[in-house]
Amino acid sequence: MTAPLLCVRDLTMTFPGRRARSAPVRAVDGVSFEVATGETLGLVGESGCGKSTTGRMIVRLLQPTSGSIEFGGRDIGRLSQRELKPLRTELQMVFQDPHSSLNPRQTVARIISDPLIVQGAPAAEARKRAAELMELVGLIPEHIDRYPHEFSGGQAQRIGIARALATSPRLVVADEPVSALDVSVQAQIVNLMERLQRELGLSYLFIAHDLSVIKRVCDRVAVMYLGRIVEIGARERVYAAPAHPYTRALLSAVPLPDPAAERTRERITLLGDPPSPAAPPPGCTFHPRCPKAQGICRTEAPVLRIAAPGEARQVACHFPEPG
């Protein structure tokens, strides 16, 4: 069996409280998953659940509090910035807001070629590669000396993708890469990312809150709630028969293309708002909002385990839905 490209185990991230005596915030609480070569894993959940923090730890923009991040068989979670430098060619990130993630004072040529120059490539060679990447992502190479404000949001995100591809990475962490774009532009960027994956053999960790996008692009889906993964499995199984009540509630809010089915289907309304990660509830952190919560849910945290015999999907619930 081929070893996974990325293997995350018991990853945690704790931030200090905003005030001197306030409680620390456990933004990510023991997350574990794998990404195979050529696979797209979708990480989905409400805002504030810790999915973006997870992505930033994987590319080491944040230092994990604990846990391990194995990339290509090597634990990169504790490497120094100097030790990480050669690995950054293989691990890149695409950010949510394309214009905010691009330096407005730099030309597109500089933005795309900088990762190569940092790795020691000659400036002329890096510029040539930048022009090639612009064409690869659907931009006009002759516009290489323009600035980010001269491009639309969708074009700016293509620049961000080109920058991420400059060093020929094996894994790209895409953090809400289409959420800031119009719907029609979203489809174009998704199509581009799928094409690039086929042509370049990329693996993606695709972070999003839009389950329609996740369904379109991902092979497997991991659902996060309050810093923990509550369900993970093949896309078809998760969408067809969600086992965790939180997953069921999220999917019940996704619009259906059939108006008749949309009118008659059951909508699951969750109680209240997500608890604060600075003061999570005891037991199952979802129990205050769960329509199925019982006594054990208030005292004992469920572990992530196989949802049903004969399948690889896992769920963290004392009373999972039957498949």
Image (spheres, rainbow, N blue to C red):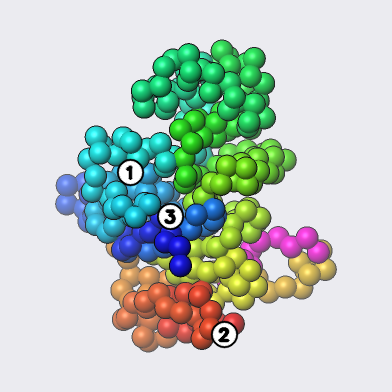
Expressed as whole percent of the image width and height from the top left, the position of residue 201 reads: 56, 47
Q: Give amino acid for label 3.
A: Leu
Q: Relative to 40, say whether 302 is above or below.
A: below
State which mark lies toward you, 2 or 3: 3
- CA–CA distance between discs 2 and 3? 31 Å
Q: Relative to 219, say whether 122 is above or below.
A: above
* Residue 261 quadrant: bottom right
Q: Quadrant of the C terminus?
A: bottom right
Discs 2, 3 touching: Cβ within 8 Å: no
Expressed as whole percent of the image width and height from the top left, the position of residue 244 reads: 51, 75
Q: Give amino acid for label 2.
A: Pro
Is 60 in the magenta?
no
State which mark lies toward you, 3 or 1: 3
- For residue 179, say whether it is visible: no
State which mark lies toward you, 1 or 2: 1
At horizontal 46% and vertical 40% (from top left) the residue drawn is 169
Q: Which mark is residue 60?
A: 1
- CA–CA distance between discs 3 and 1? 16 Å
SS at mark 1 in the image: loop
Q: Which mark is residue 5?
A: 3
Q: Earlier in the sequence, mark 2 or mark 3?
A: 3
Q: Residues within 10 Å of mark 1 (few under 14, many from 20)?
A: many
At horizontal 81% and vertical 64% (from top left) the residue drawn is 258
SS at mark 2 in the image: loop
Is 256 in the magenta?
yes
